[in-house]
Image: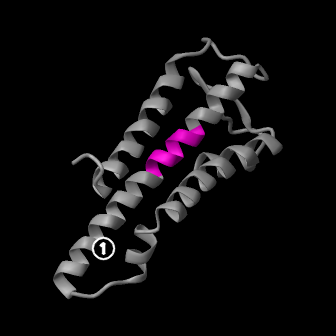
Amino acid sequence: ELRTKGFKLVFNLVICDFFATAVTFCFEYPPSKGSFFCSLQASCIQFFGLAAFLWTMMISCTLYAAVSRTCHGMKSWLDSFIHNTYLVHTCIWGISAVSIIVPFFTDSIGPAGYTCWIIEHPRPFGIIWRFT
């Protein structure tokens, strides 16, 4: 059965990884600051990259909850969070969306090597958003 909880989590992770990788290679080289495609590429890399990280974290939390439930026989707040599918999707996609909105307001999007992503200047916003 492909509709299990684990398969759905891994499927969401694969979708995020696919789009994060696909947009890395689909646009102009060398990137030019301020172009629509540069902004689109930077947004997609940040959004899907962070979402992939959060889905990986969700898979880890699910495994931890399953092991702790088996070993200790008790349910935790993590179990109720994991089983609330709408809350999980809202948190993961919402956090990822916020991570691309804020760099636009701080003018931190531009060429970063062979792709467009969050640039180091203006400091400190570029450095802060690279680590989110």
Q: Is residue 96 left or right of residue 8?
A: right
Q: Is residue 74 above or below residue 5?
A: below
**Within the image, what quadrant is residue 101 found in?**
top right
Task: Please tell me which residue is depicted at 32% across the width and 84% down the height of the picture.
Answer: 75
Residues drawn in magenta: 46-53
Label 1: which secondary element: helix
Q: Is residue 57 left or right of residue 128?
A: left
Q: Is residue 63 magenta?
A: no
Residue at far left of view: 71
Whether residue 104 appears in this view of the structure is yes
Residue at far top of view: 29
* Residue wearing tag 1: 65
Q: Is residue 100 above or below residue 79?
A: above
Task: Please tell me which residue is depicted at 52% across the width and 47% down the height of the picture.
Answer: 50
Task: Please tell me which residue is depicted at 62% across the width and 12% down the height of the picture.
Answer: 28
Task: Please tell me which residue is depicted at 60% across the width and 11% down the height of the picture.
Answer: 29
* Nearer-the-camera pick, 86 or 23: 86
